[in-house]
Every structure is written in C-alpha cells, then in structure tokens.
Image (cartoon, rainbow, N blue to C red):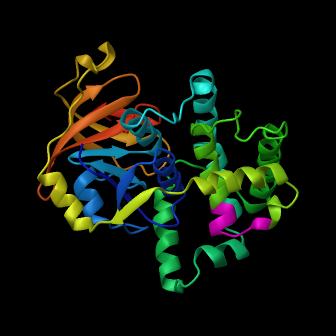
Amino acid sequence: MSDIILHHYQNSPFSEKARLMLGFKKLAWKSVDIPSVMPKPDVTALTGGYRRTPVMQIGADIYCDTALIADVLERLQPSLSLYPADIAGASKILAQWADSTFFWTVIPYCFQPTGVANIFKGASPEQMQVFAADRAKFRGVIPRMGLPQAIGQFHEMLNRIEHMLSDGRDYLFGPVASIADFSTYHGVWFVHDVAKLTEIFADKPKLQAWHARMTAIGHGTSEKLDSGYAVQIAKESQSAGFAGRKSDELYAAHLGEVVTITPSDYGLDPVEGELIFADATEYAIKRIDERAGEVVVHFPRMGFQLKKSGDA
C-alpha cells in the first residue's frame, strides 16, 4: 500500500477528526500542510476543485470528506473498529448529527470576541478579512446563526452530551470509542483547544473527562511532506481499484459517463470526471490533471449530489 497522505491545516476541526482517527488506528501517515483559504493549487490539482478540508491521498486515489475517510481507514485497519458491531448504526447517525447540526452551532458560538482573538492569534486584519470573504462563499446554503441562538443551542447540546456520559461510560455509546466520538470531539476540540472558550465546560465533569480521553488518543506517527511532491506521487501512481466491490444497479448504467459531484450543503464546487464506481456508500470518478496525471477522486454518497455533466 502507498503511504497515507493527509492534506490539512492545524486549526481545521475536520482535520483534527481525521488526525485523531489515524491515531486511533495506529497508522503512520504523511502530513501536507495546505492553505486555510483559496487558492489551493496543489489540492485543486488532486481533487479537481473540491475545497473542503481535509483530503486524504493514497497514491492516485483521493478521498474527500471525513465520513468516507473513516470508511477507508476502517478497510485498511479493521481492528479497533470505528463502527463496533452492536452500535454501528446508532454511532453513524450521531456522527452525522455531530458533523452537521452540532458543527454549524460550534462555528458561530466560537466567533464571539474572545474566541475570534484566540482563533486568529497572530493574524493581521488583512488576513482575517481574506478568511471572512473566503468563508462567506464557502458557506453555500447553510443559514447563518446569530450568536445568541448559538449560545443557547450549544449549551443545550453540551448538556445532552453530558447526560449521555452520566452513567459512567467512557465513550458516548459505552466502553469503546466509535465514529460518534470522533465526530463529536472535533467540535468540542475547536471550542476548547482553539477558541479556548473553556468556561462552558466547567459544570460538565463527564464531558471534560471524555475530552481528555479522546485527546489522549493522539495523532499517531506522521512525517511532513511537501505539497508539490504529493502531487508528483499521484502522477507516478495508479489507482488501487475496487477489488471485491461492485457498483450497485442504480448507477451501473451511468458508469463511463462524464458526471459532476457536488456537496449538497456547503463548499458547493462541482468536480467533473468519468464515473467509474458507485455503491451504497461511495462515488468515484476518474479525471486527468496536467500536473497530477490520472487520478480517482472518491466521495461519500451521503451529502453529495451526482449529475450527468451538463444537466441543470
């Protein structure tokens, strides 16, 4: 297997989710630091325009969205499962809530004065303006939540998480961690460790202990890798393919057609390519880039829209 390469930046909540999952799986990985705002020329060469962070690369295979990254890590390292059999369905449902509703409450909550000062510590006013303009375009169809509403909702969400842990369990669904913990953790991490708005956790000892347990998992073993070299690796590699997997009948007729795949909520930048695989959980398209060569870009089915190229 080629090296696992994670394209990420330090303060990205979803990058922290991916880093922690890599640590949980005890996998070695290469770390490529990318810009937090557009343009991202090396990422674009690999993905064809997908701009959300992080992106995971294995040779010429490019995996978008942490929900799919989790599935890939599970295939690579089935032990210490992210989806324990008795809670697999429930943990995935809670993870989806945490990656969407919870996350989009965390962000406006953190953008109160103290949080902004900590998130952008050392940044110039010009850099902050560039970030704000980038994220305004990035939001897509996600409605903007006001700070008072975010404060009220975030308090109640943390109360519910505290209640889930109130029977002495170590993790959200019991004695072992699941995908629900990693998806919930990155929002808590952003509030606690990046925005440093720690006062809200003062009366939640169970959640604090859970946060400490999750933090202790760590990020595993990583080495820095140059972004341009990662593109060269893609060019010199071939996709691993889909051995033992089969496209489902719903999309079988469209294999070989040129399609676009676009997130359904935010970061609404379509990626175009030839559809070569589609099953219950994943789409994959083949595309050719002048710098990266022939790559296969993978997306989760849930949360993404597939259209024939040229369709409205």
Q: Is the magenta stretch mostly helix, strand or loop?
A: helix
What is the x, y in percent for residue 181?
A: 63, 43
Q: Which region is colored magenta?
A: 190-198
Query: Dividing the image into 4 quarters, which one contains the C terminus?
Result: top left
Query: Dividing the image into 4 quarters, which one contains the N terminus?
Result: top left
Who's the residue at 70% across and 38% down the image? 172
Q: Is residue 309 left or right of residue 188?
A: left
Instruction: Please tell me in which quadrant of the rendered image residue 232 appears.
Output: bottom left
Choose between 132 and 299: the one closer to the eye: 299
Q: Tell me if residue 193 is in the magenta stretch.
A: yes
Choose between 119 and 138: the one closer to the eye: 119
What is the x, y in percent for residue 286?
A: 19, 39
Who's the residue at 20% across and 32% down the image? 241
The residue sitting at the top extreme is 249
Instruction: Please tell me in which quadrant of the rendered image residue 249 appears.
Output: top left
Q: Tell me if residue 7 is in the magenta stretch.
A: no
What is the x, y in percent for residue 125?
A: 54, 85
- Is residue 309 visible in the rendered structure shown here? no
Who's the residue at 65% across and 74% down the image? 116
Choose between 227 and 142: the one closer to the eye: 227
Q: Is residue 276 above or below residue 53?
A: above
